[in-house]
Image (cartoon, helix red, strand yellow):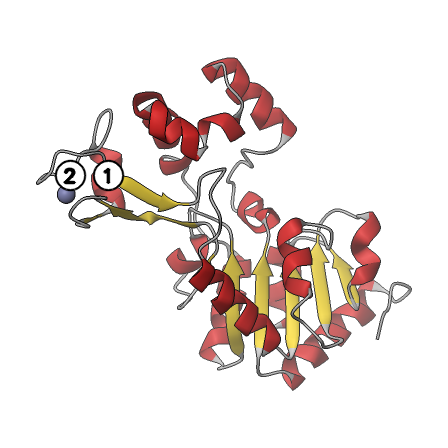
Amino acid sequence: MSDFSGTDDSRLKALQTLIRESDRIVCLMGVGMEIECGLKNLWSSEECYRIEDEYGLAPEELFSAEFYTTKKQKFYEFYRREILEREAEPGPAYAAIKKLQDMGKLYGCITHDVNDLATTAGIKDVIRLHGSIRVNECPKCYQSYTLQYMKSQKGIPLCTKCQVPIRPRVQLRGEMVRNDIMTMAADAIIGADLLLVLGTNMHHPMVRTFLQYYAGNRVVLITLHEHFSDGFADLCIHGRVDEVLPKAV
Ligand SMILES: [Zn+2]
């Protein structure tokens, strides 16, 4: 099926056919989908530069387990401003995935987006590799706290009962993806009849990890930027996910 010579139109038709014929579609969502909705990529070089300038440290240091443990006040200053207060609404790409779910065709939706736009869009059972800013708990009594509570607190948010810092259940640098979540994601990929790789490239570590579990020949990549690894997909469409996917579903 590999086709890099076809016109945009013929590739879109090929994607429409694949979606029509598939009923266990798995979406692997990359950072490009968040950027389309207006979120800044904290790991891009411009953002890294800005953050280092403002905080005196690189984002990978600020957003690390070690920093959380040793410098909570500063961690929360960064986390609140740069993660919790980022505002974005899920766009048409998410609506298209939700539609696939409503049609009974979506077998899995895998993301590393901690802002979790997919759940905001109404997609159910999203596999969140890096956790979610919505899930917060006291490490002592396991009381849960809402995103609103986390946003409303000044300084370090504390458990109202234990007065200990509440831990956001997002994966910090230096922490591993939880085993049960990795297993869920791998199982979804193993069972997929069509894999949609969205807003990332085939060389991305997340994509490379999960491709090992996929034995089929229906990998469709939709991405804005050309990349040397595009040929590893069976079908590649260059464009915005929020423009291409809604046309195909
Ligand atoms: Zn507590």
Residue 121 in view here:
yes
- Which residue, given by chain and number where applicable, does mark 2 sit on? 159
Which residue is more in the foreground, 22 or 213?
Answer: 213
Where, quadrant-wise, is the N terminus in this rendering? Answer: bottom right
Residue 82 in view here:
no
Relative to 148, is 181 above or below? below
Which residue is more in the foreground, 87 or 55?
Answer: 55
**Residue 88's x, y, as percent?**
44, 44
Q: Tell me, yes or no, whether the two marked residues, 1 and 2, touch with CB atoms within 8 Å.
A: yes
**Residue 187's x, y, as percent?**
54, 73
Q: Residues within 10 Å of mark 2 (few under 14, many from 20)?
A: many
In-image side of 22 versus 143 (left or right): right
User: Which mark identifies residue 182?
Assistant: none
In-image side of 139 versus 31 (left or right): left
Q: Of the residues under marks 1 and 2, which one precedes in the sequence?
A: 2
**Residue 246's x, y, as percent?**
59, 65
In-image side of 89 versus 164 (left or right): right
Where, quadrant-wise, is the C terminus in this rendering? Answer: bottom right
Relative to 41, is 227 above or below? below
Relative to 182, is 17 above or below? below
Residue pictured at 51% horizontal, 51% vertical: 112
Q: How far apart, in angstroms, are the residues tagged by discs 1 and 2?
A: 6 Å
Residue pictured at 31% horizontal, 26% vertical: 72
**Residue 45's x, y, as percent?**
64, 28
* Helix, strand or loop status at disc 1: loop
- Which residue, given by chain and number where applicable, does mark 1 sit on? 166
Q: Is mark 1 within 8 Å of ligand 1?
A: yes
Tell me the amino acid under the disc marked 2.
Cys
Q: Quadrant of residue 70?
A: top left
Q: Residues within 10 Å of mark 1 (few under 14, many from 20)?
A: many
